[in-house]
Amino acid sequence: MGCADTMDPRKKALLAFCLRDFDARWDEREKLLYSREGEKGFHGTRESVYYALALLERDAPGDAERAAGIISRVNSLQYLCPGQPWHGTFPSFSEHGVPPMAPECLERLGREGEYALDVFTERLFTRFREDLAAGGMGDREAAGIMATLRTSLRRVWPAVWDTYDPNWREFILCAYALILRFFEDRLPPRVAEGMDRAAAEGIAAAVKRAKSGVTPLNTNVRCVHILTASMFASRWRDGTLAAYAEESAAAFLSEYLGSGAAEFNSPTYNGVVLTYTPFMKAFGGPEVRLLGEALDAGMWSDLAEFYNPALKNICGPYTRCYEMDLRVHTAIPMLMYLDPFLVPEGELPPMSAETESAGVLCLGDRMLREDVRDRLDARPRGERLAERTFRELCERGEPGRDRSLCTATAYISDTLMYGCLRGSENTSHQLCALNVFWRAKGGRVSSLRLLREDRDGLQRHMRTVFFDFTAEKGRIGGTVSNRTGGRIRLVFEFESGGEAEVRIDGDRLRLDGLVLDGLFVIADLSGNERKASFAMSGPEGRTRRFCAALEDGETLRADISLCLETDESAFPAGGMKG
């Protein structure tokens, strides 16, 4: 009998929902799942391991055999080359080849050396692109040359994230730890032994990475890293590894209690942390349990503070995010569904990129505090201001200067909410320093967010664009400064849940029931000022973009009044300027 037979009805329904999607994507020949993301026809490793876990939970005829086949196939794909930065991790997709070899001296350079190489490469690419533009080359041709240059670099240099993902060690090996904890008796001994061997290689490499500080671990991966080390230390009776997990947890807890989570208010990554905190509390050593309890309580409390049940989304800003729609790339809707007081039993969360972790969620036991549940409830809460201070982590930042003190401020009401970030120096393309959500015409929810792109429209890591905004009732004010060495584009991206009305009324901008009245001025380092010029593009589906160029050394100063059309009587005279 599988453990699904003894699950409560919500877990059972969620697991079945997930498995229907998994079963449909199974490739018997490859012993892997066709990936939901990535290139068409590719096979994902992490989601396949999550499938193996879910199969063992269901335990229908043939499920254990299929799970064993998946695990053996994924083990065969593990990168094994001691001394390389990618040793012990796994390809994101089985079709990805072995990353390029790093020179032997790279390890001796340490984090400072890697940072210097990263900065040099970025400056070279930026300068080369600016020189192409100065020479009169058209944008399309120049963008093609830059794409070729980046491809060539990836073929000779093991650039993290571009050629390998070190975090796949943690995610896949933590799933192995859970499988071995709950279901080892359903697997052939040789498969379990192979999982232990893979874990031994991967954990040793992951600990080496963590101690070196090269490519530092952000909040979600740090949480999974510590849990994985603690669980395998217990399994192997490894006192050295157990001590490492305990020391790491104590250090993490001290940082968290002092300055919050680096991935503050990140729907995708906070969902990952809240997926694994029940296992930290259940299976970790004493310090790991304390960390799990603190993260679980603190992140649920922050989520409740910034969540808007009327608009069914989390107010920004987001330190890291993929999408504006909470239903698309986070486990949070599944976590809320599993609480019997928040979501009706028949309302399963939508299928998304994070549904693959449903099997992990269904193994954990969680119970929300009453005060958190009350704030997440769908009852109207009126209007409020929210503010949090935390230290972000710039994964590609200068060693010793990668933890800027940031403040998130937000205005939240039942029909309109917006939030922004002050003090951020993060280079990540996932940063969303300003966003707005509102109840538009017909009851749909529309959104607006501020992005930054390079001159070819790529949202990539940039060193550095500084964001310094504050939100208050009826207003957002602040600056964006470009110190990248080249031109960037600032983009206000508007998305509607339906056919939207976009109208420029004199100098006033109307977006699907939202009214914006703003002053936008660009200043250079000499103090010369000009009005910003935003050009509208679109529609592309239900998306429109308002873009302005910002040269190196320039700063955009923005003072934006905003309200819904129904509240326009209280709006100041004037219009959209710039």
Image: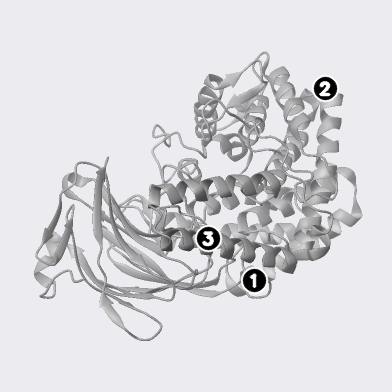
Q: Residues within 10 Å of mark 3 (few under 14, many from 20)?
A: some
Disc 1 target residue:
398
Image quadrant in which you'd find residue 258: bottom right
Q: Residue furthest top?
A: 61
Q: Residue furthest front?
A: 135
Disc 3 target residue:
128
Q: Mark 2 belongs to which amino acid? A: Pro
Q: CA distance from mark 3 to mark 2?
A: 55 Å
The quadrant of the picture occupied by the C terminus is bottom left
Disc 2 target residue:
188
Q: Is tag 1's residue or tag 3's residue first in the polypeptide sequence?
A: 3
Q: Residues within 10 Å of mark 2 (few under 14, many from 20)?
A: few
Residue displayed at 46% across by 54% down:
459
- In the picture, measured across the screen, residue 336 lies left or right of residue 576, that is right
Q: Which mark is residue 526?
A: none
Q: Residue 241, how many percent across, how many down?
A: 86, 54
Provide the secondary structure element on which disc 3 rests.
helix
Q: Nearer the viewer, residue 320 or 331?
A: 320
Q: Nearer the viewer, residue 430 or 359?
A: 430
- In the picture, measured across the screen, residue 285 lies left or right of residue 91, that is right
- Which is closer to the viewer, label 1 or label 2? 1
The quadrant of the picture occupied by the N terminus is top right
Numbered marks: total? 3
Q: CA distance from mark 1 to mark 3?
A: 23 Å
